Structure formats: C-alpha cells, structure tokens
Image (cartoon, grey):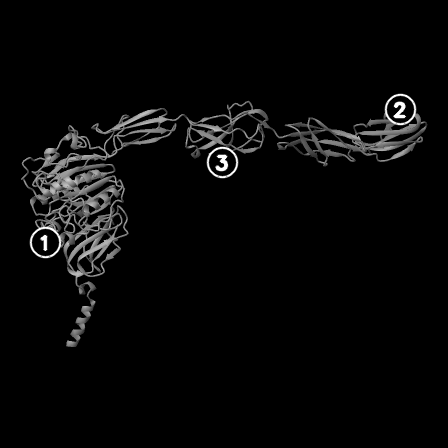
Amino acid sequence: MHKNLYITFLIILNSLPAMAQQSIAYLTRIPYLQVVTPTGITVRWRTDKAVAGQVWYGTNPDQMTAIASEAQPATEHIVSLTGLQPATMYYYAVGQPDVKIAYGTDYTFKTALPAGDRRPFRIWALGDFGCGTDNQFATYEQYKKVATQNPANLWLWLGDNAYSAGYDEQFQQFVFNVYTKTLPNLPFWPVPGNHDYGNNANVRDLPYFTNFSTPQKGEAGGLASGSKQYYSYDYGNVHFVALDSYGYEAGLWRLADTTGTQVQWLKRDLAATKQPWKVVYFHHPPYSKGSHNSDAETELILIRENLTGILERYGVDLVLSGHSHLYERSYRLRGLKGPSTSFTKNTDLAEQTNGRYDGTPNSCPMLTKGEGTVYIVAGSGGQMDQAVAADYPHVAMAYSNTTVGGSVLIDMNDNRMDVKWLTSTGQIGDQFTILKNTNRTQRLSLEYGEQRELQASWPGEYRWQSGQTGRSITVSPTQPANFVVTDPLNCLRDEFQLSVMPKPRIVPAAPPATSVCVGTSFPILITAENSTKADQWTYDIQLSDAAGRFDAPTVIGSGTRQNLRATIPAALPAGNGYRYRVVTKSVDFAESVESATFAVKGLSMASLSGTATIMQGSSTPLSITFTGDGPWKGVLSDGTAFSAITSPVTLTVQPQATTTYQIQRVENNCGAGMVTGQAVVTVQVIMGTEELAGGKLAVYPNPTSGVVSVDLTLPTPQAATLTVLNTQGQVVQTKGFKTANAHHTQLQLPAAAGTYFIRIEVNGKQVTRRVVKL
C-alpha cells in the first residue's frame, strides 16, 4: 500500500507545470530604461533571486515575440535590446525564461529620433528630487497630469537624485518606489550631484555608478567619453552633454579645471557635433541666489569663471543645473564671468528680451544667432528652501521663484525650443522661447507660371498679408511680388521677395532644308528660353498653311523635347511659304516662335493619253502630262522607260498588236508619285491580200466593229468602183475612185450587225469580199 502511495505522489509531482518546479524570482526594483538610441535601449531591473533575466518585446502588445536574455544568473539585471526601428513604440515584459514577472500597460518604450531629425519631442528635467517631501510628490503629480496628453520622450536628472547621501536604499525609497508610473516607460539620463556622492568627491564605489547605465563609447551619438562620470548623446536635432560637476577625475580635476580630461573631452565633443541645438546639464549652477550663492561658494565661482566661456564659445543654447533649491532662469547671457555686482545689461546680455513670448512687454522670443546661453536652476523637484541670498534674486535672472517647487518641460520642434517651468501647483510659472534662423528675408527667382511654396521659418502661429494662417502658402505670381508673414504678436517676420522671369519662349531650330517633300519626316530641335522645365513638358508641332498663317494649323508631330519629330503630310499641297512652330501642351503661357519659311514639294502625278487605231507596223504618239516638281522619270506598263524635265512629254510607240498602255511607275525627287489614265492603241492586222487587175487588194479588219479599210494598189493608174451589198443583194453603199495607182478608203458599215459583201471593180474585173460586222 505504501508503495502505491509513493508511485501516485510521483505521478502527481511529474504532472505539475514546469514553472511550478523552478525557482521564481520576484521584483525588488521595477524596470527602468537607459541609453535609448534610434536602434536600441537598455532595460534594467532587480530581483530577489539570481536568475537569467529575459525581456520579451515587440511593436504589438499581443505579439511580443522578440526575446533578449542574459547569459548568467544575476539579481541586478541589465539587458540591451538592439536592431530596433527608430522613433517606434515597443511593448515589453521582463522576467526569467518561461516566466514573465513584470508587464502591463506602463511597460512601453519609444526608440529615439535619429540624429538630425527635426520632428517634435519633449524633455522633462528636474533636480534635487529624491527626498520624500510633499513637494516631490506634488511636482510628480503635476507632471503625470500633463503626461496623459503629451508625455516626455526623455528625462534629465540634474543631480542630488537621492537624499541625503545617495545610498542604494535612498534611491529605492525616494526614486524607484515613487516614480513607478514613469520609470518603466520613460528613459532617463542622469548626472550626479554632491549628495549622490555622499558629499565625498573622491569616492567612486557609489550606488549612482552601479545603478545606472550611460553611453561611455559614443554609442548614443557624440564622442566616446570612456567615463561613467560624463557622456553625450543625440536625440532628434539636439546634442546633449551630461557632466559631473562634483567628483574628482583621477583625484586631480573637477569640472572647473579646464585642463582636466572632462573639459578637454567637452570641447572636442562640442566642436564635433553637427546638431543645431546643444543642451548641457550638470549639478552646480554658475549663477544662483537661492540656497546656494554663486557669488560666495568656490565651486560655483570657478565654474562660472572657467566653464561658461567654453559653453558660450561652442554655441550651447541651454544649461540646466540644480543644487540650489529653487527655480531660476537667466536672460540670454554672454560673457558674464564676474559676480552679480558686475552685471550690466548692455555688455552681458546677448539680447534684452525675457523670451516669455506671451505678449507682455519685452517678451519676444530669443533670436540672436549663435550668441549667448540661457541658464536654468531647477533644484526644486523635491527639495524646497525658503532661504535665499541677501541680494536675491540674481540680477541676470529673467525669472526666479523660491516659494513653490516644480520641474522643467522642454518642447523641441525643428528650430524652436519652448521651455516651461511646471510648478507643483500645476501652474506655468515661467516660460520662454528660443528660435533659430528666423526673421529672414529671402530673395527667390521664379519662372513664369511656376508655383512656389513659401514657408514661415518658425513653427507656431502665422498671419500672412493675404489672410492665410497656415505655416505655408503656395503662390504663382506673374510679376515681381513681395509676401510677408508675421506671428500674431509681431515678434517674428519673414519676407519673401520674388522676381519672375519672362514667359517661356519655345524657339525651334531652322528647317532641315529650304524645301522638303511631302511625306518627309525629320527631327525638330527646340531651345526653351526662360525655363528649366522644358524637358518635363510635352509638345505639338504645328504646321501653317502655304501662306505661313496659323489660322487652322495642322499637327505634324507630338512628343517630349527629346523625341520631337515632324512628318509632312503626303496630301499637303505644294507651296513655298510654310512655317512650323512648337506649342507646349503642358502649360498655356509659353510663347511659340515660328520657324523660317520653307517650301513643300509635292509628289509627282502622271496622266497618260493617246488612244489610237493604227495599221500593224505603224507607230503612234502617247502623251504624258505631269504635276509636281520635275524632273520626272518612270516606266510604262510595257517596260518602256521615260524621263522628262518639262510637261507634257510625247512618247512614240509601235505595238504589233492592240495594246493598252498604263504608267507603271513615276517618281521625282520626292519619291514615287501617283499615276492615272491609259492609252489603247488598236492595231489593225491585214488578214490577207489578193490580185485584182494586176494589183493587190486588201480588205480589213474582218470581222469588224463597223469600220472597214480597203486598200488597192495598181500597176498603172486606173479608176475603180466599190459597192457594199447586204445578204439580200441590196446595195447599201457605193463609192467611186478616180484614176490612180493606189486607192484607200474606210467604209462605215450599216448599224445592223450581220454579213455584208464588198465588191471592188477595176476595168471590168471585180472581186467580192464577205465581211462580218459584229
């Protein structure tokens, strides 16, 4: 019985699912995203047991079929996904082989925009936040509200990320356990602050450096730093540089030391980037009058004196810092290296505007090209100090606030940067706009009839002089014109000065010869003046009448510029005043220039005449009349060749039998022509002769169609009598001949067909011939 129970237990145990038999790990730190690039991302999380971490992912939440796994078991999981598509939303889950332990609607990421891509994206930035204060939670809640409609694409940590000493449990309690709705789906890029170092600048064995992955090899854009302390990356058309403003490098240099490796790398990196926007962030601010005074603290003084000039020289647009527990935002500064007491607007401001762009006085966007930098202190993401310097606010600041906390939202859109300070109460406490390459005057040359899209140089709102409100309009002026677009606040203005070329002229090449034959085909070359689009058009070749008029032109060819060919119609009348022109079918405003005149020669036509009746052995003339240009030549149907230079021409023929003559072929210099007419030459054959009165008598033809010839040749002159009788013996015709050696006559027999008898009598001798009339 015990044996049977044991076997039953084994059967039940073996039937359990495989996952029930393996060690399942549980999350102790939620997944978070690092080093996002256009084609990759790193996913990190922590478990209570060492297992081989695995990530399932895909662009469809129901088809996460791609898998990336760790090779060795670990509790600190770092899995890099590669081969992804740029700017694409992915869904993912984390776990261990065969077991997903964390997934859901928050588990998504979007790969980065490629470097140089000008599409919009959003940045969320805050410093001094991981401290567990009400201000931290309130600031985060306000971000989550705006993120429901427009979430950020990347998150900048400005240092002092976990209070008060950067311990791992402080990161867990005040960061990973707080931002649970955001960490699984928003990649972040951190820099350390003094509290992350535990206020010991020489320590490197820190949770900050073990908890986070950063691009040390230039894999996210920028130059490889080879250091965990600082790095750079590209996102869209912005180059970001993250610096360490607190820790020592090799125990020798800090950020304020321009001979140190970090600053030397910084200069090379900024010089190398081709991105139009540059954003640099580090913890310690060069300008502040909050809980830290930049005129009194050595670290801040040295950064201001030694670093700001480098940032401005390399065209950095925005510098973000924390450390001082308030919000401050400067004007666009240029060259302010001294204390606040040395500040003067005329020398230290690149431009006077506060940049709020809200219609208040002095609030137009910052537009100065390549000059000056805006500095933000955003150290109230969690910490809040009411304590400020005695001379607060800093005179270089356009806005300062120490009464409420908040975070920074930066919206990038092509050549526009909009920065807002979102307070912990949900208000926009500060805002400013920077624009590059705006307020432009463009001089454009248009071809006549060309449509041109004019686009304002900034993203935003627009007022065109013609009333349109879109960013671009399409115009097609026929004469010089100016178009102006402004923004509703009249801060921005683009002007387009358009010149218009004359109408296109299509000029054909001269005819191939002064005269051409009908039916001839030849290429037509054209010159298109005042247009670069002639190769894109299609054309008709039009032919005038013989007087050069185009009242009712004939189309003699069509095609593109490269294959235009004219064919002179075969039936075209000859003439000396023809012209052609080439007309484009693609536009209706191009002018067509007429060609020089040329002659059209027609094909020849030959008409044959000369029907005759002759005696066998006789000859007769045929006449050929020509039209068209000579000379002509040809062949008759009997093979007789002819040629002529004038019309008509006479040919003499001597057929031996009745022959119908036709023209078999005629041609002139234009080729084979047309023929008409015929000539029937009837040859009368003498059927036989007999003797009469010592002479010879011939009666022919027999039978006959009505006419009978009688020939009588005598040795001596004698008279003769001719009588025609019908079959009843009745005389129907009599004719006498005077004395002569030869007598010839043609008798017209009666109309009635039948048999007749012709009797010829000479000096009492006679001969009678029987003749049949058909």
Label 1 crowd bin: few (<14), some (14–19), many (20+), radius 10 Å:
few
Whether label 2 touches label 1, CB < 8 Å: no
Q: Which mark is residue 169?
A: 1
x then y, percent, for residue 232 = 22, 46
Per the image, the residue denoted by label 3 is: 563
x then y, percent, for residue 282 = 15, 44
Which marked residue is nearer to the observer: mark 2 or mark 1?
1
- Answer with mark 3 or mark 1, whichever residue precedes in sequence: 1
Residue 682, by quadrant, is top right
x then y, percent, for residue 4 = 17, 75
Label 2 crowd bin: few (<14), some (14–19), many (20+), radius 10 Å:
some
Q: Is residue 505 visible?
A: yes
Residue closest to the eye, 43 or 291: 291
Total tally of numbered discs in the picture = 3
* The N terminus - image quarter: bottom left
Q: Which mark is residue 699?
A: none
Distance from the alpha carbon under mark 3 to that under mark 1? 80 Å
Residue closest to the eye, 227 or 213: 227
Residue closest to the eye, 717 or 210: 210
Label 1 SS:
helix
At label 2, which amino acid type do we have? Phe
x then y, percent, for residue 206 = 13, 53
At label 3, which amino acid type do we have? Asn
At label 1, which amino acid type do we have? Glu
Which marked residue is nearer to the observer: mark 3 or mark 2?
3
Per the image, the residue denoted by label 2 is: 737
- Answer with mark 2 or mark 1, whichever residue precedes in sequence: 1
Distance from the alpha carbon under mark 3 to that under mark 2? 82 Å
Q: Residue at 24% across / 56% down in the picture?
A: 68
Q: Is residue 385 above or below residue 445?
A: below
